Every structure is written in structure tokens, then in C-alpha cells.
Amino acid sequence: MKKKVLFMICTTALAWFVSCESDNGNKGASADHDPNAPVTIETFMPDSGRIREKVIIKGENFGTDKSKIEVYFVDQLTERAASVIGVDNNTIYCLAPRQMDGDNQIKVVVHGKEVTAPTRFGYTVAENVSTITGSSTNTGTTDGTLSEAKFSYIHGVGAVGNEAMLIFQRDNASVRYISIPDNAVVTVHNGFQGAKPAVTKDKTTVYAAGWNSPHTVYKYTKAAGWAPTRIGQLGTEFGRARAVALDATEEHLYFCDATGKFARYNIATQQVERLNDDTGAATSDGNYLIYNPLDGYFYVACANKFGIYKISPDGSEVITYAGFNGAAVLDGYVQECAFAQPNGLTLDEDGNIYVCDGFNAYVIRKISIINNYVSTVAGATNVNGQIDGSPRDARFNYPYDISNDGEGNFWIIEGWGCAVRKYAVE
């Protein structure tokens, strides 16, 4: 039986505890931690919940120094630190972190002593798809509030944190800044037909290259209000390039053009180095790609081949990683699954890969880092539309690119749908 009732009884104590933290941070039982006695966990409440759930852990010998307390929720992938908001010798108050769905362990470390709760915490992932701005029935290029703004065919998106992003229009070529907190859409660059951009880890700089030759490269910085600065070009020897991606050093922009050439551009010197002239990833419009720092490889979505390549940074190793089993939407392990039109990719905080499966699919796919299994996580196969709600009920209109902001939000742009959608995973 869930312990929500018990938890409600404790909320008054929790409110009192938090309000008293300004005095000494540790009202309640006065005993300090005894280094010669064991640390124990008796119970916790509630026994299930979601992100930011207030969890109370009862036990003994926690002490009264919050800086010496660490709480982790351990799921099947990793352990995740909770925010500890208070402690007395017998009680720890914390907020549950974002976790993987399932029954997860709670681990407490007190003055270096580790103890695990006798029962597990049932974590439930809450997911929802919503439309942020734009519509397939009211297109154009109009700035204004989120409800007023209009968009043409969108090519790429780069999330820059705090529910803001840069989007790159293919038709009526332009770069638009979208901010949910400001309820605003602003055009920051007219006449540039860019594709999927590369965003630095600190989310203060965005790089983008032109879709067509000579592939002019621009830099957009938060400090400059996202105004463009031209920093060079990829060159005329490349076919269409639909995306650029930064490596771990953030010194180069990598890309894979429509002819299958894999190359990189040195941001400081503006030099272009061709790494592999024939990866096999030949496609009419160029390829989307991302860099995965967990394994050090680039992942290249090749729509014409209905699959995803895995390419080493020096271009010497090209692996047919997922799909390549004909145009279809088929879930399964990476060598057994199928994609209809794999386009934009992104990573979540754990390194799982999310893929926009576009024409004749209209769904969002996920490649799990745990078991290399491909699943359909949002939308309905070959059902086109713009419907919000749960991932199962949601419908997409040509989803072509996706960007994760590191805060549990996936921002999806729709090509012919001319809209920006939010897929929230909490």
C-alpha cells in the first residue's frame, strides 16, 4: 500500500524544518553523528513518486551536519544524487532526482558510511507532448508572441537552456530565437538557410553551416543576443550538409555531406580536413549527426539508407549501427530494427539516442544505451497530425529535428508542420 497518507502527515514537520534552516540548518533531534555507531535506515515515505517528490528518510545516527549527508536514488543505469534539504539525527529530508522508470534503491552516505534502504522507491516517469508555437495551418515568417508567430519549413533546432532555442528555417530562410519565459519569437538572422546547429556544452554558443555550397559557417553567441558572426565556410567541394556537430574538445565542427564525405572544420584556423570520402552515407539532402561523448563516436542518420551509421572521429571506422532493414517502423535491437526516414538526433542525459523518424513514420524513436534496443516512444506510425497529450496519444507532422536541453525537455521541430513541439520527460 502506498504511503501517501503518512507522507501528508509529515508535510507539516517538513515545512517547519525548512523554515528553521535559516537558524542553524538542523532543528530537531540534537544528537551528533557517532562515528563508532552504525548508520541505519528504517523506512522512507512516500514509497513512490516522481521528480522533485519530497522524500523523508527515517533512521538513526545521521547526525546534524547536512554537508556530510549524501542521498542517491539508484536505477538500473546509474546512481543519481538527490537534493538534501535538511537533516536531524533520525530524519533526512530530500527531493527525488530524475530517474529511470521502475523500482529504484535509495542509498544514503553519512560521514563516508554507506547504507541502503531495505525497500525500493517506485519512480514513475511523467511524459507529455505539447505544441509551443507555430501551426501547419497558419504558415509564414512572423515574429511576436508564441501564439502570434508563424513559421515556414523548419530544418534544425538547437536548445540553449532555460526553455529557449534557435531554430533554422529552410523556406523563407532565417534563424529564429524562441523563448518560452519571454513568450517571444525573434528573427536574429535573415537570408541564411542553415540546418541542424551545434551547441556548446555551456549553451552560450551555437554554430551552424549553410545547407548548400559553399556552406558558410556562422557563430551565434548569447552575449551578443544571438546575433550572427561569419567565421568561414566548409567549401564548394561538398554536397548538401544538413548538420554540424562539435566533438569533445569543441575545437572542430564535423559533418557528413550528401555524397557521404565525412569531414571536419577547425573553428580557430578555418581549415577543412576530409576524413573519409566514402562512408556509404550518400543521401539527397545531407545527413543529420551527433557526437556521443560516452563512446567517442559520431552517429549519422542516413535517410536514404534507412539507418544510422556509427563513425569514429578520424573517419577510419564506419559501422552500420542501427536499421538498414528497409523503410519501415520496426522496434527491436539495433541490427533488427527498421527506420522509415531517420533524420535529426539528440542525446539525453544518460546517453540514450532519440531520433526523429519523419516521412511515412511521424514518430520519435529511442535507442537505449543499456541494451541497444530501439523503441517508438512518441507518436503513431504513419499517422500525421499535430495533437498534444501523452506520448501515445500525440501526433507529429513531419518531425525532422530534435534537441535535448539537459533539463528533461526535448524540442522537436516539424518540417512541413511548421511548428515547435515539446516532449517533456520528468
Image: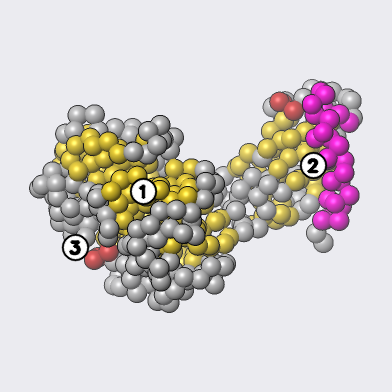
Q: Quadrant of residue 134?
A: bottom left
Residue 373 circle label: none
Q: From mark 3 to mark 2, how far is it between C-alphas?
A: 57 Å
Instruction: Specify few, some or many for label 3: CA neighbours under 10 Å numbering under 14, 14-19, or 20 or more.
Output: some
Q: Nearer the viewer, mark 3 or mark 1?
A: 1
Q: Residue at x 10, y 48 (%)?
A: 237
Q: Looking at the magenta stretch, what is its main secondary structure?
A: helix
**Residue range corresponding to the magenta coloring:** 3-28
Q: Would you name the residue on which mark 1 appears? A: 187
Q: Is residue 226 above or below residue 47?
A: above
Residue 57 circle label: 2
Callout 3: SS: loop
Of the two numbered discs 2 and 1 on the same chain, state the one appearing first in sequence. 2
> In the image, 122: left or right of 171?
right
Q: Amino acid at mark 1?
A: Thr
Q: Are marks 2 and 1 in contact (CB under 8 Å)?
A: no
Q: Nearer the viewer, mark 3 or mark 2?
A: 3
Q: Amino acid at mark 2?
A: Ile
Q: Residue at x 49, y 65 (%)?
A: 377
> In the image, 157: left or right of 34?
left
* Residue 324 covered by magenta stretch: no
> In the image, 409: left or right of 222?
right
Q: Residue 228 or 268: which is nearer the viewer?
A: 228
Callout 2: SS: strand
